[in-house]
Amino acid sequence: MFAERVKESFKRAGKNWSVLIVSLLLAVIMWITLIFSEDYSYDLSYNLTIETAIPGRAMNASAKSALSIKGTASGYYLLQKTYTGTYDNLSISVNPRWLVHKGGDEFALPGPAIKQLVQEALGERVAIEWIASDTLYFDIPQESNRKVPVVALASLKFKSQYMQVGPLKLTPDSVLVYGPVELLENIDSIHTLPLNLKEIESAQQGILSLSHISNVTISPNEVSYSFDVCRYVEKRIQLPVGVANLPGSLMVAVIPQRVELRYRVPIPGKALFSPADFKAEVDLSNFDALEHNVARVVLSRAPKEVVWYEFNHKFVEVIYK
């Protein structure tokens, strides 16, 4: 009987100790959370990089000295900086009007601009009290630049009876490239990273990064893309091949005299068309320049609903009568 009472007492004591330990741990966690969520005044340092757009000069430059500020930040932010023991890298965008040219490649960014731009970059993480440096200096070397078109590398696969309508649009469709003259001379376009889409059945849009080129800066370094998609029905029709712009009184014939046209129109709203709605012909305005008396067939008239077409014979032979 006595032994059972002792055993029961230890069991109850064990439960009480467990509750006490858990309570202490929760109290410690809440205390730590409260301590580190408070704001503290601290000296902070950053390696500052600017992005700017001075004609004929590099777009990026690093400050010659570290940016030192006194600011108020949360305990979590200060603990992170203390733990890493290194300067944070901070990048800001600077309007060229803020920069003062000191001669050669050297430019200066005055204190008021530094405080405004750095505070915007830091956001709510840090509230700046004062900045140790009145001015920061940067070397922004001269560079050539040129505008080149952007070329999309796209592999687009559509679901059955779906197709792209119109071109793939890029915005912007051209970018500025900065770098040594000898490199820029060999750059006539910039390619996007590959866009691979499958089973497409609706209009698409998104963002594409641009390919990297060593020692060349590209601005901007990404573009948006978009293209329209429709569901279609395909029809076939036989058309006679006419002749346009025949010089003088020359009499000619074309072989074959008729071609088959495959065309597509969107669903819904598809319409039925007759051969009279289309016109296939060859343009002989430059008859003497024809190679081997062969001319390309063109569709010179078609309903506006047609989104794609193809002839079974893209070329015909032109012979004298």
Image (cartoon, rainbow, N blue to C red):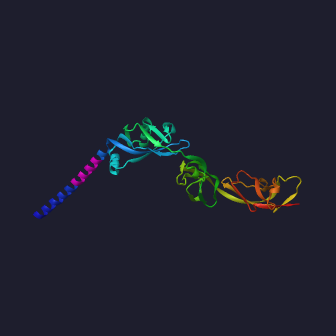
Classify residue 266 by image quadrant.
Answer: bottom right
**Magenta stretch in the rendered image:** 20-32
- What residue sits 25% from the left and 52% below the top? 25
Spot occupied by residue 84 in the image (x, y as percentages of width and height): 35, 51
- What residue sits 48% from the left and 41% below the top? 106
Q: Nearer the viewer, residue 41 or 6?
A: 41
Residue 1: tell me if it is visible.
Answer: no
- What residue sits 69% from the left and 59% below the top? 234
Is residue 21 in the magenta section?
yes
Q: Nearer the viewer, residue 189 or 79?
A: 189
In the rendered image, the vertical position of residue 300 relative to residue 134, given as above or below: below
Is residue 114 in the magenta section?
no
Q: Nearer the viewer, residue 276 or 142?
A: 142
In the rendered image, the vertical position of residue 81 relative to residue 103, given as above or below: below
Q: Quadrant of the C terminus?
A: bottom right
Spot occupied by residue 165 in the image (x, y as percentages of width and height): 65, 53
- What residue sits 37% from the left and 44% below the top? 45
Q: Quadrant of the N terminus?
A: bottom left
Spot occupied by residue 198 in the image (x, y as percentages of width and height): 57, 60
Q: Is residue 33 left or right of residue 93?
A: left
Secondary structure predominantly adopted by residues drawn in magenta: helix
Q: Is residue 289 left or right of residue 32?
A: right
Spot occupied by residue 196 in the image (x, y as percentages of width and height): 56, 59
Classify residue 316 by image quadrant.
Answer: bottom right
Residue 22: tell me if it is visible.
Answer: yes
In the rendered image, the vertical position of residue 14 relative to residue 53, given as above or below: below
Q: Nearer the viewer, residue 89 or 61?
A: 61
Residue most extreme to the top: 112
